[in-house]
Image: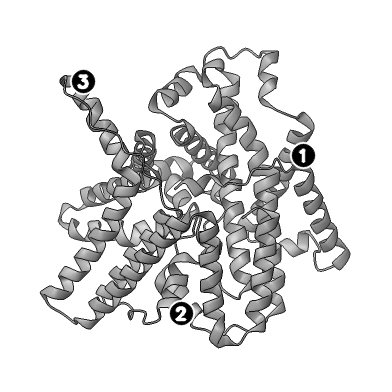
Amino acid sequence: MISFGYLIFLIFIVIIFYAVTSKYQRYLLLLASLVFLGQLSIPFLLFALIFSLLNFLLGILIEKYKEGLIRRIIYLSGILIDIGVLIVFKYTSFFIDNINFIIDSFTSSEPIPSLSILLPIGISYYTFQCIGYIYRVYKNLEKAEKDIAIFTIYTLFFPKLLSGPIERSNHFIPQLHETKKFDQGNIVSGLQLILFGFFKKLVIGDNIGLIVSSVYGNLGEYSGIPLLLVMLLQPIHIYFDFSGYTDIALGSARLFGYKLTDNFNRPFFAPNVSIFWRRWHISLTAWCNDFIFKIILFKRRRWKDLAAVYSVFITFLIIGIWHGPRWNFIILGLLQGIAINYEFFTKKQRLSIARKLPEKLVVVTSRILTYLFFSFSLVFFFAPTFSDASYFLKNMFSNLQFRSSYLGIIPDFRDFTVTIIAFLVLLWIEAVQEKGENLREKIPVNKRWIRWSVYYVMIILILYLSKGENTFIYEQF
């Protein structure tokens, strides 16, 4: 999605999309999505088609049986199949490895042979979409989709296939039924989002990522300052990588007249962890809130406050597990659950202290503490193993004296300086937006020469600072 080939493919599909009649627009998008996935992997394309067809038929069958045991059996079977498929592909090796660890620790039996199962592209995203869709049909919150082409586009729409966002059926499917006519405003805003996404990913995300990956790739060689620097930089790396992808996905969809769910809302300005997760990976956390947290909370409502504690832990445990078959991801999720429950039970005390301090000091301090907590927890995201994460945390504050050899983690100081300046500019833009101020009053982008000057500068920096990366962090999930 960050290649010249993707842009050519996208522009070609957009031109044909507005050239054909509305009757054929959906079939063109279906064909484009299948071609996009097929050129990545034919087996994964076939799997995704079968998976989409299965959930399409499940929705129709659930709606056909208005009530009774058969309807519930179909619904539960569909949920179990979707979850089961995700578990088999994503977690089989993890379970086998942990069972073998137990066998090796307590017995002399032969270990279970390990399996090498390739993870289908986008499975974590379209599985959650299908589970949400089946749930809503079962609860009579929406009608089952009767057009297989529309439903397959919903699950496999190429701009969002690799890393989401996780679209709600009631948000995206109705858009697919609409006739889309050429709108210059959509083209302009779409191209702006795509350019902005490329800039965030290639100029900031990738260049910060070089430092992060360099240290994690040779972790035993570092302690103290490099680890502290990486801890502070890794939220910037993942944010600009992932939000860059999201902007490209949203911009690509906007060219066709569709609006996807934005995954980010200035998360680094969140005053606490609870609000942070309403602003970070929004489509995932909102999905988990509706289909996990609220359901568990309702069923355990007799537990009162303990119901909320339990629901939060289960929700973030699942968010951690969703990221992949690693204990580090489970710890990452549990850390978020601990922080949010801490905030819940100490809210009165913290508000009491905050009232005695200057408001600006409270705001700035709370944002810094939230950022530092997220930075700390991301050690479990980036570290390949638990032992690597333990090494990182144990050695983060040891040998804090500066060594000239540490400068080697920065590949190019000139590029790094430009990257930091670009980051600070975008941070300032988000700060203006966070205050609710009109950015156009700060930057008169209505003037064509200013607007195009910004575009040219962004394009030049993209071409100059691009390091040839062609993957996104969240593609692996």
Which residue is drawn at the image coordinates 54% and 38% (left, top)?
365
User: Where residue 157 is drawn, which disc sits there?
Assistant: none
Q: Looking at the picture, which amino acid does disc 1 mark?
A: Val
Q: Is residue 131 left or right of residue 278?
A: left
Question: Is residue 320 something that shows in the picture?
Answer: yes
- Percent from the top left, x then y, of residue 287? 38, 60
- Whether residue 358 is situated above or below residue 258 in the rendered picture: above
C-alpha distance separating marks 1 and 2: 43 Å
Crowdedness near tag 2: few (<14), some (14–19) or many (≥20) residues, C-alpha within 10 Å: few
Query: Which element type, helix, strand or loop, lies under badge 1?
Result: helix
Crowdedness near tag 1: few (<14), some (14–19) or many (≥20) residues, C-alpha within 10 Å: some
Question: Is residue 262 something that shows in the picture?
Answer: no
For the rendered model, the colour scheme is one colour
Name the residue that disc number 1 marks.
418
Q: Quadrant of residue 286?
A: bottom left
Which residue is drawn at the image coordinates 43% and 56% (left, top)?
43
Name the residue that disc number 2 marks.
174
Instruction: Looking at the image, tell me whether mark 1 or mark 2 is earlier in sequence order.
Output: 2
User: Where residue 105 is drawn, which disc sits there?
Assistant: 3
Q: Quadrant of residue 234?
A: top right
Query: Which element type, helix, strand or loop, lies under badge 3?
Result: helix
Disc number lying in front (1 or 2)? 2
Q: Looking at the picture, which amino acid does disc 3 mark?
A: Ser
